[in-house]
Image: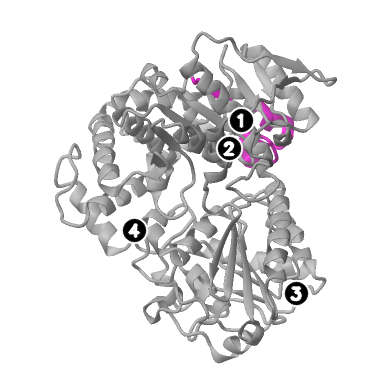
Amino acid sequence: MMVCMLRVLQSGSVFATRLPTQPRVCRLARLSVRAYSTKTAPHIPGMEYQDAICTLNTLQTNASALEQVRRERSHPQQQLQAMRGFLERAGLTVEELNHLNIIHVTGTKGKGSTCAFSEQILRSYGFRTGFYSSPHLVQVRERIRINGQPIGKELFTKYFWQVYGRLDETKDAHGGTMPAYFRFLTILAFHVFLQEKVDLAVIEVGIGGAYDCTNIISRPWVCGISSLGIDHTQILGDTIEKIAWQKGGIFKPGVPAFTTKQPENAMTVLKDRAKEIGCPLQVCPDLEDYKADCGPLRLGLAGLHQHCNASLALQLTHVWLQRRCLPDKSFPSTSVENTGAPQATPFKLSPIMVKGLADTEWPGRNQTLKHGAVTYFLDGAHTMRSMQACVQWFRETAAQHERNTSGSVARVLLFNATGERDSAAMLKLLVPCQFDFAVFCPNITEAIASCNADQQNFNVSVENMLTRCLDNERSWHLHHGRGDNPGPQLLIPDSLPLVPEKKADTLVFPCILSALQWITQGRDSVLADPAKRVFTVKPSITAKAAPLCDADEIHVLITGSLHLVGGALKHLDPASSK
């Protein structure tokens, strides 16, 4: 959830900052949209893609779109009805989507990883794949992939204006309505996959399932549900049973579905939903139950929690392949455990499946990057269960790295959380990791006006983001039994205090780049470029970094938000922004 932060540095008070103005390129781009037909891409050299992104961002702030979302929250059944209308206005039909041979996946934790495993396996078989996921880390094009790669800027621009133009031309006849941001991108993804003639589309649900706009799909080939937990409670409900009911909404009559093992109450709801809808639901076996000639399986995604995601992906792709290659073969047999839950049968994995599991990549999830003396551990965990998995992965992986280090290691946490998440509870899980520093910053990539429009979010104010960071820092101190002890401490000259005076183990920075530069102390050449330094930190703050300078290596865990991880990757992996 990034915004440009020009006014933070210009304003006399950080907390009096209003929502920053958009970069000049965005302002120019929006004016240009009105000057020509949206049927074709704009003709301003070098601005075509950026112009599309800036126009897309208007769907975040469009008053009618936001009112539409608020209205439909109290009448969720209207969401799919509205989605169907937008789809038709864009020139598509629900029936056309059935030609995409869709794998539809929902869940609270692991649905993106499950989709990544599934897409890689089927691509390894030689099929042309489409993959729609959310959110993006660095560029919005990441959400729409062909054969594992984000669609190119030219392709995105071409298809964006085709879809946007059709919707814009028909809005006057429909009360001036345009689809909100995620709804538009979902329509765009369907359009891209149909135009590019993919053999299949792996579709990740946005939020929930029953009323998510991806659930416009009427006839997927197979459905999957990854691990369930508590998240998005204002939309989905505040109990695991309510959330399971929403997730089970993607079930379709006669369409095979699989789920990972779930809490008992959640599993009961899923079974009832499947029976009500007429969907054959099965529970995935443990990954260790599958047979393979290669010995123990190797997964491209780290962490024990990925085992259940991999098993789910194997079942989804196995059924998909059977339908594609053996259309007359009956649905795989099931066994029934003592619990009465239908158990999917493990099978012997082909060498291609084994390779697909090993080759899977999914940036920002249990990802490790080593830049000289600095090692980054990135994971977008943002729920209690995913943070528990993140902590386990980090402690094990960091310990392995430390065993290979002859000298001292400094551990640093870089954290932020957004929305309704209980950041205090997540921080409590991180305390045992024994960090030397805990650093907090908002999901703002850098404090300059030229930041990437792909990472702008106009629905949250800078003031609210910074206040949340201070709350997170306070929670960290409370977990350590220190309470509050405010005092004067400046991170930026000529600005108001951003953090209270506390022990030197916590700091709050105004953007991701400034936080990373302080943490690494010039020891990461990717960040040490003088052109990237956006302001000078006061000497008193620099002095607090002595342990970082003295350590032989620095290990940095970046977690709490996929948007934070994406903002960090923009700086740590410059190729991701090209």
Mark 1: secondary structure: loop
Mark 4: secondary structure: loop
Mark 3: secondary structure: loop
Residue at left offset 52%, top offset 34%: 352
Q: Is residue 349 left or right of residue 189?
A: right
Residue 153, numbered label? none
Residue 578, numbered label? 4
* Residue designated by label 2: 354
Q: Is residue 252 left or right of residue 172?
A: right
* Residue designated by label 1: 349
**Colour mapping:** one colour
Disc on the earlier residue, 4 or 2: 2
Q: Please report the bounds of the magenta region as a residue range.
A: 220-245
The nearer-to-camera label among 3 and 2 is 2
Q: Quadrant of residue 560?
A: bottom right
Q: What residue type is labelled 1?
A: Leu
| Label 1 – label 3 distance at C-alpha | 56 Å
* Residue designated by label 3: 484
User: Answer yes or no: do the residues labelled 1 and 2 have beta carbons within 8 Å?
Assistant: yes
- Examine the rendering and report whether any part of residue 68 can be seen: no
Disc on the earlier residue, 1 or 3: 1
Q: Which amino acid does label 4 sit on?
A: Lys
The nearer-to-camera label among 3 and 4 is 4
Mark 2: secondary structure: helix
Q: Position of residue 101 (x, y in %)?
A: 44, 22
Disc on the earlier residue, 3 or 4: 3
- The residue carrying pointer 4 sits among few (fewer than 14), some (14 to 19) or many (20 or more) residues within 10 Å by Cα, namely few
| The one of 289 and 561 positioned closer to us in this rendering | 289
